[in-house]
Image: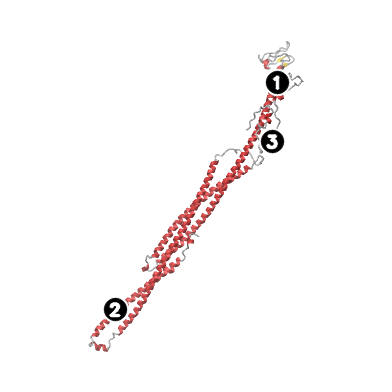
């Protein structure tokens, strides 16, 4: 602030350019920009050079105290006495009443309170007091003008600084708001992507019920095999492994689904926090943008009570920046966790689909090998059955031959006595007949067993091939198991 060193009574005090503060262009309502009032006159210049009656300048006016004393030969220092013996007056108010003018001097003609010198002194005191007041008024006016000039200069400078600060603050808020917008868009994209992955995971869980139903159906169908075929073969073991693998994969997928839903809650909470922060910064930026454009001629400015009072809940700029950075950092951390969870889900679904397809291939290979083995057994049994049937027919033919050769005729009766050797041959033929009968019965039993075995093998083959392999043909692909 410029300090004026000129005396207040000199003309240069109001017009000195060096001691006046520089006015800014924003003070268009400053009245001192239009014209400058003339400098206040010096009290010495207001002194009368001559008296009103045209007396010399060396003699004071008649209404002021004279240099030669009282014109009526009554010095001011002496008390006022009676005018004459005929008008003695009354002295009853004290010794100093004549000097103070509180004692009236009364005669029959007039009443006198003050002397001429007292009157002149009063005039001088009044004029001096008026001159002092005028001088003080001029000095105050001069100081007021300087105060107004300084106030306008300081106000213009403060207003320019505040406007520049508001522009900088508005830019800072706009930058932070833009950064929040980018973070909100990135978080929204992450939420949408994670939601797609969640739907994919639920689709994978729905598709997972199909291989489980197929494996369970295969196990139930295989329980309908004949008793002798209820063996714990390799297809049985592979089907049990497949069901266990499906249960394990379902447990992992359900756990991952729970983690995804929890992550979605965190993502939405982070987005909501950023949206609230963005909304606050949007309102703050709009307010600062309006404030930046306000001028002294704006018609929307009003005086509001408590406008300069800082609210108790208002934060500092450092905490404001810290809160915004913490919000952005939390959003970035949450987005990274969501991205890592999506990568984990992709790996889980890929590995699950690969494991299920590998196990399904193992089951199908085991079923194919088992069916091939059963086909070989069936063919071997059918060949044995044909052989048995052929031998059974040959045995029956041989029995008929033996029975036909044992007939008792007249010649035999006549030759019995003569040829005893025939008895030995007959005994041998009877023994052979019994053996043929036994072989026939055994062949018939084997025939029944073979037919039963062939029937059971065909039934087992029908279950494994016509039922299980047909069901396995509907096993979902790896793409479907991945949730696509």
Residue 255 position, x and y percent, is 45, 55
Residue at image location 31% in from the left, 77% down from the top: 439
Residue 113 seen from this side: no
Residue at image location 61% in from the left, 45% down from the top: 286
N-terminal of the pair, mark 1 or mark 3, is 3
Residue 1 quadrant = top right
| Farthest residue, direction right | 54
Q: Which residue is mark 2?
A: 435
Quick check: 298 above or below 391? above
N-terminal of the pair, mark 3 or mark 2, is 3
Frontmost of labels 3 and 2 is 3
Circle 2 residues within 10 Å: few <14, some 14–19, many ≥20 = few
User: Cα distance, mark 2 to mark 1?
Assistant: 182 Å
The image's colour scheme reads secondary structure
Frontmost of labels 1 and 3 is 3
N-terminal of the pair, mark 2 or mark 1, is 1
- The tag on residue 124 is 1
Residue 202 position, x and y percent, is 49, 58
Residue 444 position, x and y percent, is 34, 76
Q: Which residue is mark 3?
A: 33
Question: What is the secondary structure assignment of the residue under circle 2?
Answer: helix
Q: Is residue 328 left or right of residue 46?
A: left
| Farthest residue, direction top | 85
């Amino acid at each position: 602030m410029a300090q004026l060193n000129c005396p207040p009574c000199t003309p240069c005090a109001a017009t000195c350019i060096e001691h006046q503060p520089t006015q800014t262009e924003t003070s268009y309502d400053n009245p001192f920009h239009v014209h400058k009032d003339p400098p206040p006159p010096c009290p010495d210049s207001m002194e009368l050079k001559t008296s009103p009656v045209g007396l010399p300048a060396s003699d004071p006016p008649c209404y002021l105290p004279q240099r030669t004393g009282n014109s009526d030969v009554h010095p001011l220092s002496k008390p006022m006495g009676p005018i004459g013996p005929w008008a003695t007056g009354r002295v009853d108010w004290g010794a100093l009443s004549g000097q103070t003018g509180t004692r009236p001097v009364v005669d029959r003609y007039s009443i006198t309170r003050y002397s001429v010198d007292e009157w002149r002194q009063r005039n001088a005191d009044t004029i001096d007091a008026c001159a002092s007041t005028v001088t003080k008024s001029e000095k105050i006016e001069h100081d007021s003008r300087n105060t107004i000039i300084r106030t306008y200069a300081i106000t213009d400078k403060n207003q320019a600084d505040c406007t520049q600060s508001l522009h900088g603050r508005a830019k800072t808020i706009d930058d932070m708001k833009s950064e929040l917008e980018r973070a909100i868009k990135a978080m929204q994209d992450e939420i949408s992507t994670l939601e797609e992955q969640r739907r994919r995971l639920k689709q994978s869980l729905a598709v997972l019920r199909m291989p489980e139903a197929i494996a369970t159906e295969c196990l139930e169908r295989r329980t309908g095999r004949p008793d002798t075929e209820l063996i714990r073969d390799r297809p049985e073991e592979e089907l049990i492994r497949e069901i266990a693998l499906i249960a394990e994969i379902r447990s992992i997928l359900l756990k991952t689904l729970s983690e995804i839903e929890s992550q979605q809650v965190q993502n939405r909470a982070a987005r909501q926090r950023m949206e609230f922060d963005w909304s606050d910064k949007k309102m703050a930026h709009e307010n600062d943008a309006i404030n930046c454009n306000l001028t002294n001629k704006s018609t929307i400015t009003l005086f509001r009570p408590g406008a300069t009072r800082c609210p108790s809940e208002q934060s500092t700029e450092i905490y404001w920046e810290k809160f915004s950075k913490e919000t952005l950092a939390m959003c970035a951390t949450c987005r990274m966790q969501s991205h890592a969870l999506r990568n984990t889900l992709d790996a889980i679904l890929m590995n699950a689909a690969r494991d299920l397809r590998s196990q399904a291939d193992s089951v199908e290979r085991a079923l194919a090998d088992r069916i091939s083995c059963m086909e070989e057994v069936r063919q071997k049994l059918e060949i044995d059955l044909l052989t048995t049937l052929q031998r059974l027919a040959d045995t029956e033919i041989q029995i008929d031959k033996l029975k036909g050769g044992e007939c008792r005729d007249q010649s035999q009766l006549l030759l019995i006595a003569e040829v005893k050797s025939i008895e030995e041959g007959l005994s041998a033929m009877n023994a052979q007949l019994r053996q043929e009968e036994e072989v026939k019965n055994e062949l018939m039993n084997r025939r029944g067993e073979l037919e039963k075995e062939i029937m059971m093998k065909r039934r087992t083959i029908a279950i494994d091939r016509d039922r299980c392999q047909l069901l396995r043909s509907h096993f979902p692909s790896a793409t479907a198991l991945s949730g696509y």
